[in-house]
Image (tube, helix red, strand yellow):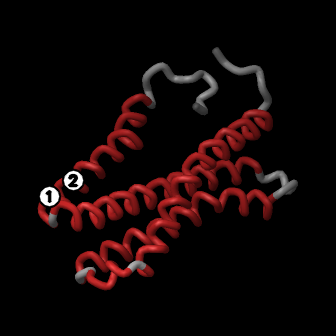
Amino acid sequence: MARDETESERLDRNFGDLLQELRVAQTGVQILFAFLLTLPFTERFRTVDDFERVIYLVALLSAAAAAAMIIAPVAYHRMLFRQGRKPELVRSAHRMASGGLLCLLISMVCAVLLVTDRVVGRGQAIIVSVLAGCWFVLLWGVLPWLRRGADRDPAGDT
């Protein structure tokens, strides 16, 4: 059933919905980023090999990128506040959120690889990390993509 709302009301609702979604993602990103920031200050970090150091840096930098992209819509909104540019804001915020989720996926898979490499060994860690990455891609990408055409919302925005 179509909603009885103006284009402006729909944009406001879409932006509000997006901000609610970003609050969930932001918490996870911040916790992961904080964890990664503490690792180099632990005694055991001194024993990491070059592979683990590279994986750590990819995890850290992708977590930082995810945090930046997931928080960016708020800053973007502040800069465009009351300028009548809500359509641009909603489109840009959607792209930033999508990019942030991709960076979060990369960071999480790298974090899994980093930890499992220490716990079960490199070969098994790579298998576990690939499976984790596939799981994220399935839940965050494939399943939603498969549902895009099914039971389409007449308002076209869910």
Which of these two is toward me, 34 or 109?
34
Q: CA distance from mark 2 to mark 1?
A: 6 Å
Q: In the current view of this chain or complex, which residue is farthest to the front?
A: 43
Q: In the current view of this chain or complex, which residue is farthest to the top?
A: 1
Q: Position of residue 104 (x, y in %)?
A: 45, 58
Mark 2 in CB contact with mark 1 (< 8 angstroms)? yes
Answer above or below: position of 62 versus 101: below
Structural crowding at the residue carrying mark 1, measured as other residues with C-alpha within 10 Å and reported as few (<14), some (14–19) or many (≥20) = some
Residue visible at 44% across and 72% down? 60
Residue visible at 70% across and 53% down? 89
Q: Amino acid at mark 1?
A: Gln
89 relative position to 25: left or right: right
Q: Which residue is mark 2?
A: 128
Answer above or below: position of 121 versus 14: below
Which of these two is toward me, 48 or 87?
48
99 relative position to 128: left or right: right
Residue visible at 79% across and 64% down? 79
Q: Position of residue 78 (x, y in %)?
A: 79, 60
Q: Quadrant of the N terminus?
A: top right
Q: Which residue is mark 1?
A: 124
Q: Amino acid at mark 2?
A: Val
Choose top left, top right, bottom left or bottom right for residue 72: bottom right
